[in-house]
Image (spheres, rainbow, N blue to C red):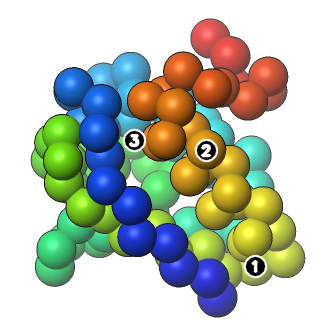
Amino acid sequence: MKELEITITNDTGLHSRPADVFVRTAKLFESSITVSKGEKSANAKTIIKVILLNVSQNDQIKITADGPDEEKALEELKSLIESDFTKINEAVKI
């Protein structure tokens, strides 16, 4: 199991489009992925649960991945967040 703590810096946090892209990216991996904010956590592959975390700009989240591709999953999600959701994996493009 691998963990990553990161701050969300984009203007809208993990709402609507960024949450959709985040979930689509998480779904590319076989590993189980969880995203947490404070005491709340959600399956990173379920958009409603991710949106209900109410992650806003400058909130810190923890992403946990457990499975055969956990490192790659965290790398991709970190890259996505650090690019303010502009560096989208080709498999996720809308």
Q: Is residue 52 visible?
A: no
Q: Is residue 68 visible?
A: yes
Where residue 37 is drawn, which disc sits there? none
Q: Nearer the viewer, mark 2 or mark 1?
A: 2
Percent x, y of residue 54: 15, 47
Determine which residue is flagged by label 3. Answer: 47
Q: Which is more N-terminal, label 1 or label 2? A: 1
The residue that appears at 31% across and 55% down in the rendered structure is: 7
45 horizontally vs 17: left or right: right
Please name the amino acid that badge 2 sits on.
Ser
The residue that appears at 75% across and 70% down in the rendered structure is: 71
Q: Secondary structure at mark 1?
A: loop
Percent x, y of residue 75: 68, 57
Q: Residues within 10 Å of mark 3 (few under 14, many from 20)?
A: some
Percent x, y of residue 58: 18, 47
Marks 3/1: CA–CA distance: 20 Å
Please name the amino acid that badge 1 sits on.
Gly
Label 2–label 1 contact, CB within 8 A: no
Q: Which is more N-terminal, label 2 or label 3? A: 3
Where residue 67 is drawn, which disc sits there? 1
Determine which residue is flagged by label 2. Answer: 79
Q: Residues within 10 Å of mark 1 (few under 14, many from 20)?
A: some
